[in-house]
Image: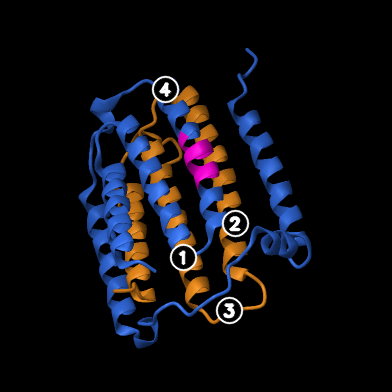
Chain colours: A orange, B blue
Amino acid sequence: MTPTLQVFLIVSAALFSIGLLAALSRRHAIFILIGIEMMLAAANLNFIAFWRFDPPPKQPIGVMIALFAIAIAAAEAAVGLALVIAVYRHYRTTNVDQLDQLKG
Amino acid sequence: MNGLAFILIAMVTLAAALAAATLRSLMHAALSFAVALVGIAAFFFLLGAEFVGLALVFIYTGAVAVLIVFPILLTPRDVGKTRGFNWGGAIVAAAVFGGLIWSILKTQSLAIVAPHMPRLTVKQIGAALMTGYVWPLQCVGLLLTAALIGALILVLEEKQ
């Protein structure tokens, strides 16, 4: 049995949903960041799968998009974790439910 | 492409991802996240994108996972307050998963096997990065520099 494009997309959809689950249902800010990173990785898997199952294009477009997405995800992780530390210093908590000072 | 390898990698990756999303201990979740990323890198190897797979291992399991571990150690564990689990999020995630699976299975043009493809060499990737993608490359470099300087400024101690 050789895997078709469909099974790769199904695995990627499962990873995306697990990331969404972590981002929506956990209350610790670092868990939310882990969920967002997992969703980004699932999107990268989709890019690579669509590139591999396409008739070969002139330039490796899917690989390029995945590389740039990885770089942007790394920048996002650095800023997000710095924000977690800054928020912890200010509020002494990392529970996102308690960060409600701006709530109307 | 090997079906057995695919099934093994998919099982390990999805189990590690599920553990990262549901484990109580933050440190265990971060380590499961690293395992899940190694699984995704294995998928990239399986798909013939070795360079991206290696970059993923270097950047994610090498840098991002360690970067996640540092705030875990720097912020004390107030586990009692952050233990809650929001079931509404689980329902939304299940609905999104169902919708995605339904649309993937309904699209007939996705049930194809991989065509034969010449091996993508690092030389080709480098040539593409230095010719057609040179402006995006410079912009990503600028973005990374700005983001890292911004992150440093965010965590600098405020002067009393």
Report, in whole angstroms, how far the alpha carbon at label 2 lies from the one at label 3: 18 Å
Disc 4 is attached to a residue of which chain? B
**Is most of the magenta stretch helix, strand or loop?**
helix
Q: Position of residue A48 (x, y in %)?
A: 50, 66
Tell me, yes or no, whether the highlighted magenta stretch contains residue B59.
Answer: yes
Q: Quadrant of the N terminus of chain A?
A: bottom left
Disc 1 is attached to a residue of which chain? B
Callouts 2 and 1 on one subunit: no
Disc 3 is attached to a residue of which chain? A
Query: Residue B73's mark?
Result: 4
Disc 2 is attached to a residue of which chain? A
Front one among B159 and A51: A51
Q: Position of residue B24 (x, y in %)?
A: 24, 34
Q: Quadrant of the C terminus of chain A?
A: top left
Q: Which residue is mark 3?
A: A56
* In the depicted structure, whether residue A95 falls above or below residue B130: above
Q: Report the span colored magenta.
A: B57-65
Report, in whole angstroms, how far the alpha carbon at label 4 lies from the one at label 2: 30 Å
| Camera-side mark, 4 or 2 | 2
Report, in whole angstroms, how far the alpha carbon at label 2 lies from the one at label 1: 15 Å
Tell me, yes or no, whether the highlighted magenta stretch contains residue A9.
Answer: no
